[in-house]
Structure formats: structure tokens, C-alpha cells
Amino acid sequence: GGGTTPTTGPVVVEASSSAYAATSPETITAPIDIQNGELLYLFQSVDYSATGNSTMTQPTDFIENIAYARVNAGAAGIAYQSWYKEANNESGNYTLTESDGTHVLSGIMLRISGVDPADAIDTQSCSSGTAEPVTAPDVTATVDNAVILRLYAWDESKTLTLAPSGVTVIAHNDNSGIDTWAGYEEQATSGATGTAVMDISAGTRWVACTVALKQAGATSTGGGSGGAGGGAGDTEGAGPFSLLDDGASHSTGMKLTIPTTCAGGFSGSACEIFPNNDSHWTAGDPDLATYTNATYFKRDPAFYTFCSPNTGATTATASNGRSELRYLFNWTTGVIDRQYKFRFRDEDVVTGLKSNNGQLHRGGTESSPVYKGTYGHTVVRANTAQAGASTTITLDAS
């Protein structure tokens, strides 16, 4: 909710700016003529010595879409990360910091029109290596008229000898110690993008990312099943974590509840959606592996986005409309530590109403949460009356 009306028309890379700093902080000059509703996309790299490793803090209001990763861990190498934001009354330049404060920083910011910044990224992937050539990976665009960003960073000031074929250069940030490079291709129809190969003068540490951007209002042309009220085209992985595998050898237990009706899987009148590897799922039901809903459950590489109005279809045990992603597995005795990283975004939280961002229940018949975090609280709080003396559970503030 809120914000500005997305720009319409084809996806266009309107302008760019390059940034470099010998040490943190790095000042990123704003691209020229930024318009409200456009997408600002920042691709950033940092040059490390053998022992270097740190974190980057992005400019205010930028949202991560490519997570931090380090190439050639334990030796000299580079790290990379990217973020985006919707332009909204932008003023002045931007600042990025690096926690160690001693390493070279290099980045490129793009100004892009024709996308909906809240739903701009169709799909993406990155590859890395230490040998030449430098290859941006193939991804499968699910929409027509996509713009394919090709983003590269490499170490040791190696010389660019051959740019990737068919890719229009946007910017080459050629600095002492590290280079960043950005280009794009236009793809008229959905499908595989193919790889994009760059030649440099010798092997070194490098990363290359392919990011497919979709036109505002574009719909997928294939793949996936949405069920009534849903959409097609999202594939498993088009979100910040898997909905089919919890990473701990348990492939069942996820359930999505949304406050609308659909064919199959009811609790009260709200729709319950399971992944296709869950025992509750049957052929013909909506499939959580691919499900998306333009109103209640949107997917992009950085977030699963919920809309949960106070009115709407309810569950059998609740009087308010509910959107909930729930993990149902009961951990067995002896399990002492499980770690999950969830990223959710709240939109239009109504003043005076609570938005429950996460809770943890005991097993068995206990229904009250042991831990519960609500909108406005950064630390998950303990319900000691439910936890009991024999229960020891530790959650960090993030």
C-alpha cells in the first residue's frame, strides 16, 4: 500500500552511477533525474585480503535481493551483495558502510523505469569462480519483454578483454584492486536467458549475476499452478527460503492459510495450501510449491509478502481473517538447536491492530504460544507461563 503509481511502458535502464572508496564509507552519487516510482538497484562488491570478511550496511530504505556472499573464503577474495528500493522523493547521494572499515569498495547504482518496484524481479542467479572466463548464469524468465541485467565483479584489476556478446554495457567501474561492470539485454519472450560470458586478462576471483526484471503488470506465461484466486508462474526458490525442504531433512509440515476461499483444503472457510510433498496435499489442490496470490501471498527473491485484512475468510478457531505460513513439525526429544531465517514485510499495518510476525508453540496439545513477536517489537518475547521449567528455547533478536 501507499507509495506511487508504478511507471508504465517497457523496462528501461534510464541512468547509472558508479561508486568507489578505498575504505568505508562509500558515497554513491544518485543517478540523474530520478522519478518517483522508478526502481533504484545497487550492486556492490568489496575487495578482501586473505583474512578479510565483514558486513555491508546498505543505504537507508534499500531492500536486499542478493544476499551477501564471499568468493574464495579463507584466502584473498571479493564479496558481493545487492539491494533495491522504490524511488520516493529522493534527495542527495547515498552512503554504504563496511563493518571492518579497511577494504576497497566498488558499486554501481541503476535507475530503471517501467517496473513495479514492489514486484520487479522475476528471477535471478549468481555464479562465482577463480578461473577465466567470467560467466553470468542462465535463468528462465517467466514473462515476456523482460530486461536481463548482467552484473559482474572481479579482483586484482584484471583487464576486460571481451565484453559479453549481445549485452549492452551500462557502466564499467574500473578501479585499483577491483572492478564492477553492469549491462543488460532485452528478451522478447519468456524462457531461458542463456549464459553471458566475459573475458578478462587472467584468472582471478570473480562473481557474475543474472537478474531478470519484469515489466509492470506482466503476468507469467507458463509453469506453476495457482488454484482459484491464485496465479501461475512462480517456481520453488522464488522466495527467500524453501517451502518444500526445511533444511534439516524434513520435507513436510509447511502450510499456508489465506483469508479467501479456494478449491481444496479448508479450515473454516479460509483456504489452507500445502506443498505437493505433504501428506495433506492431493491432486487438484493448490500447491504451495508454486502458489502465489496477487492479494494475499506474493513472492520475490527477498520476501514472502502477506496481506491479512481484518475481514475475510476465517479459520475454524479464529474470528478474524488470517494469512499465516506455518511449520507443523514437532521436534523430537534431544533436539537442542534449530535455526531459521525468515524475512517478511508488513504493508499497511492498521494503527491499533496487531500484526503477529512469528510465534513458537510447544508440541502435543498445547495451543498457546511459548514465544510470540508482534509488529513494533524487535525482540521476540517469552511466555514463561507456557514455557515451563523443563523447556529451554533460545531465540536471538533477529
Image (cartoon, rainbow, N blue to C red):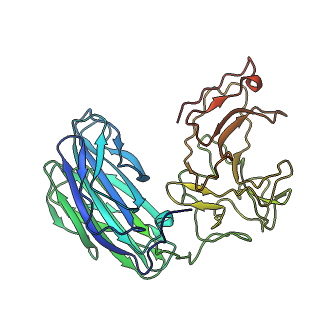
Quadrant position of residue 256: bottom right
- Residue that lies at the very extreme toward the front in this rendered image: 352
Up-down relation of residue 322 to residue 388 (above or below): below
Percent across and percent down for residue 269 are: 84, 60
Up-down relation of residue 362 to residue 163 (above or below): above
Look at 49% across and 54% down and name the residue there: 302
Quadrant position of residue 36: bottom left
Up-down relation of residue 66 to residue 229 (above or below): above
Residue closest to the eye, 271 or 276: 271
Look at 73% across and 69% down and name the residue there: 227
Q: How many marks?
A: 0
Apparent side of residue 242 relative to residue 184 in the rendered image (left or right): right
Percent across and percent down for residue 53 are: 31, 36
Residue closest to the eye, 251 or 388: 388
Apparent side of residue 172 relative to residue 91 in the rendered image (left or right): left
Look at 36% across and 69% down and name the residue there: 35
Residue closest to the eye, 134 or 238: 238
Look at 49% across and 71% down and name the residue there: 5
Percent across and percent down for residue 106 are: 23, 51
Percent across and percent down for residue 1 are: 57, 62
Residue 138 visible in the snapshot? no
Residue 234 visible in the snapshot? yes
